[in-house]
């Protein structure tokens, strides 16, 4: 798997927020902390990580929700967007212009994966119906010719090289001429990358580029460099305006996230990523799909579907508490709030396998009423919250006054509570008894359930 560790960390953080009861400040802070840990472990630049955290935290808590989207879905979407933003923003597919030979030259320091990638791109394009040949212009390293020849020979990819020449520019020119004659639409030129530091490498690149006039120059960067990859990417971006980047060795590299984000931060477009030693292990880089896969989700639509599903599982717990019928006034309020988040109460009960014969009053609980209820609950004593029977006439007046509501509002809340309790008990009894291995709502013990069942 590509960026396995990073993916694991991100998925764990996302799953946690999906399973949390409320997507409140504490949950978002926890999420951000986990994201930070995952990104820093993958060698993503500290500043970048903190900027991203701040944006997620702010947006997650402050932004108004789009219609029909829950807070949790929204948070997942924000995380998705922010990660896409630092890992590449958009896709830059390799363009091959028809009607002429497109010359693409690969550069990069020794060992970065150039020769491997030359053969990978040639195969990739040939598979897509673009006749593509390769030129070995690495006249520096012994064995360079043989390596590329071996890689492409079996696949019948046109190849040019000259083992007797030490003049890389001459070989490159000759090779391009030859492959044009063979009517190649794309010609990939492998270079030597004699220099270990950026400056020498860029000079070498410009010399060859001047002679062969490529349509595109691609810098091959070793993904195991982590955020250090940005040094090469920046020097490259400054040296040419026809450049794009391939980050290799993202399979198994613990620092791949750092490499991708650091290259992206330079503004250089990433066209492909190398994801293994084999010739087919190359992917055209599409950040949105890539991040979706990292998070374990195909695309945004399926992401949102999954979030929705996950939410229903969570709220099943709330529904179970509710259906036990043994809840305090505060539990009642919490359950109602949880259930309401899922949409129509009848739908929730359908999910629970309970025939939906719910009093209309309860179904129609409006947002503003829930807010009223909240302040009323805050005006009650702990004892009253556990046992609302304690609330007598004089207490009702006091609670109404304390919460700035009317006595009939307080009475309505208490009445709704008792009605719901009775109804829930009736509906839920069979369900709970019939489910020995059911998941318990948070904070609820098996003892409590047993006691409730009486
Ligand atoms: N795991 C892995 N290894 C790669 C990848 N790309 C290249 N390599 C390996 O990196 C080493 C150097 O590759 P090579 O193409 O010879 O690099 P060059 O010196 O830049 O031409 C070889 O052992 C390749 O098999 C990749 O995406 N994943
Ligand atoms: Mg090579």
Image (cartoon, rainbow, N blue to C red):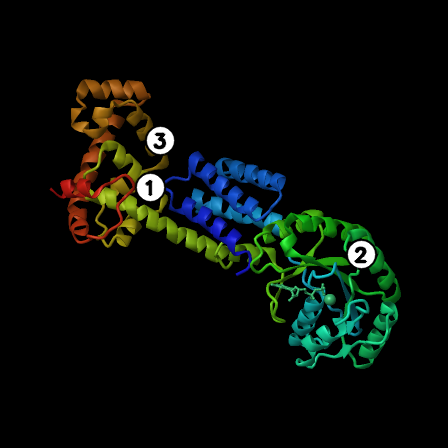
Q: Nearer the viewer, residue 268 or 358?
A: 268
Tag 2 secondary structure: helix
Q: Which residue is mark 1?
A: 338
Q: How many marks?
A: 3
Asked which quadrant contains residue 394, the reply is top left
Q: Which residue is labeled 2 in the image?
A: 201
On the rendered structure, is 59 left or right of 204?
left
Does the Cβ of the disc 2 residue fall within 8 Å of ligand 1? no
Q: CA distance from mark 2 to mark 1?
A: 60 Å
> Whole-percent x and y of residue 116?
68, 68
Find residue 313 and report its horizontal and vertical position in percent.
Answer: 33, 50
Which part of the image, by quadrant, shows the C terminus?
top left
Query: Which one is in front in this view, the residue at disc 2 or the one at disc 3?
Result: 2
Mark whose residue sits in front, 2 or 1: 2
Ligand 1 location (quadrant): bottom right
Whole-number angstrom distance, CA of label 2 to CA of label 3 = 66 Å
Residue at the disc numbered 3: 371
């Amino acid at each position: 798997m590509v960026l396995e560790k990073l993916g694991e960390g991100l998925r764990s953080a996302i799953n946690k927020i999906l399973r949390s009861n409320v997507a409140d400040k504490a949950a978002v802070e926890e999420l951000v902390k986990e994201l930070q840990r995952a990104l820093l472990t993958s060698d993503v630049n500290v500043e970048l990580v903190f900027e991203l955290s701040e944006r997620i935290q702010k947006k997650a808590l402050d932004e108004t929700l789009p219609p029909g989207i829950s807070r949790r879905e929204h948070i997942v979407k924000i995380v998705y967007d922010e990660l896409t933003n630092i890992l590449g923003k958009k896709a830059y597919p390799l363009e091959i212009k028809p009607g002429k030979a497109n010359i693409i030259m690969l550069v990069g320091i020794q060992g970065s994966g150039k020769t491997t990638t030359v053969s990978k791109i040639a195969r990739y394009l040939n598979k897509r119906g673009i006749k593509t040949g390769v030129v070995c212009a690495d006249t520096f390293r012994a064995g360079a010719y043989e390596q590329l020849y071996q890689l492409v020979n079996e696949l019948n990819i046109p190849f040019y090289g000259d083992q007797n020449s030490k003049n890389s520019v001459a070989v490159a020119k000759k090779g391009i001429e030859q492959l044009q004659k063979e009517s190649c639409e794309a010609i990939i030129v492998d270079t030597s990358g004699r220099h270990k530091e950026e400056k020498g490498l860029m000079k070498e690149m410009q010399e060859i580029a001047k002679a062969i006039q490529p349509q595109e120059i691609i810098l091959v960067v070793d993904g195991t460099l982590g955020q250090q990859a940005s040094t090469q990417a920046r020097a490259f971006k400054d040296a040419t305006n026809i450049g794009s980047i391939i980050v290799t060795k993202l399979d198994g590299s613990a620092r791949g996230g750092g490499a991708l984000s650091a290259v992206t931060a330079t503004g250089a477009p990433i066209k492909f990523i190398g994801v293994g030693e084999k010739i087919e292990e190359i992917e055209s880089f599409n950040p949105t799909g890539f991040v979706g896969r990292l998070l374990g989700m195909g695309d945004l639509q399926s992401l949102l579907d999954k979030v929705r599903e996950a939410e229903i599982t969570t709220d099943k717990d709330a529904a179970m508490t509710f259906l036990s019928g043994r809840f305090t006034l505060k539990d009642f309020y919490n359950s109602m709030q949880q259930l309401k988040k899922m949409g129509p109460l009848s739908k929730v009960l359908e999910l629970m396998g309970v025939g939906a014969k719910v009093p209309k009053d309860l179904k129609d609980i409006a947002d503003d009423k829930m807010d009223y209820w909240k302040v009323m609950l805050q005006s009650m004593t702990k004892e009253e919250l556990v046992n609302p029977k304690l609330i007598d006439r004089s207490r009702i007046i006091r609670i109404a006054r304390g919460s700035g509501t009317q006595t009939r509002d307080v009475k309505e809340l208490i009445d709704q509570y008792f009605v719901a309790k009775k109804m829930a008990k009736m509906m839920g009894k069979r369900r709970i008894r019939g489910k020995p291995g059911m998941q318990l709502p948070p904070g609820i013990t098996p003892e409590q359930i047993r006691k409730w069942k009486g």
